[in-house]
Amino acid sequence: MIRVLLAEDQHVIRGALVALLGLEPDLEIVAAVESGDAAIPSALVHRPDVAVLDIDMPGTLDGLAAAAELRVKLPSCRTLMLTGHGKPGHLRRALGAQVDGFLLKTAPPEDLVSAIREVAAGKRVLDPSLAVTAWDLADNPLTPREADVLRMAAGGADAAEIAAQLFLGAGTVRNYLTAIVAKLNARNRTDAVRIATEAGWI
């Protein structure tokens, strides 16, 4: 019997997945939670073989952060990520977190069941439609400092606020932002934020 923990914040989807997986004779849902924050303590109590985690969940931990923490706190638990969209940034973070599987929510139900079984058996699973995306992931051109600056700009901070937070001069921050826009071939700062966010660089 494969013990499964499910973390999905949307009640209807979570209920549907519990019902669907419950029909399989070799799968047992040991816990169904609505956040990454709840997934960790629940996993430590129920010790599932596989955690099926939605990537986008509210709280301190999204699905990928929860997967990374599970890898440390419960190494025996394999992780399968579910997402509504295969953003390159999500896939990059998933590969970085060394998750065991990555599946789109649009996949047929039998694909999810098969993925859980394969992950439980020690295999890695990648949604076929994401294989090309994984192959094409570009390296991050931003330095850690540039990423910090752009992350703060994305949060709405102006050059003076960023300078104060990072102990830089306002002119230096403006230089960083100009360099970032050029590196990303962006039209402007807003476009740079969009490009970097979608690529998972910030």
Image (cartoon, rainbow, N blue to C red):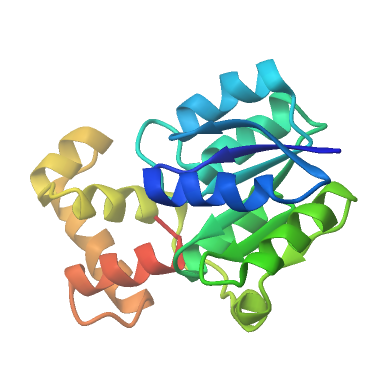
Q: Is residue 121 visible?
A: yes
Q: Residue furthest top?
A: 45
Q: Residue at x 59, y 79 (%)?
A: 133
* Residue, far right: 121
Give the camera-side residue of 133 and 83. Answer: 83
The percent coordinates of residue 154 (x first, y second) are 22, 55
* Image quarter of residue 95: bottom right
Q: Quadrant of the C terminus?
A: bottom left
Which residue occupies the foreground of this view, 26 or 173?
26
Left or right for 169, reference 142:
left
Q: Residue at x 23, y 69 (%)?
A: 178
Residue 175, percent from left and from top: 23, 62
Q: Residue at x 27, y 73 (%)?
A: 181
Q: Is residue 10 visible?
A: no
Give the image location of residue 193, x and y in percent.
27, 65
- Front-most of residues 31 and 93: 31
Asked whether, in this view, residue 143 is left or right of residue 104, the answer is: left
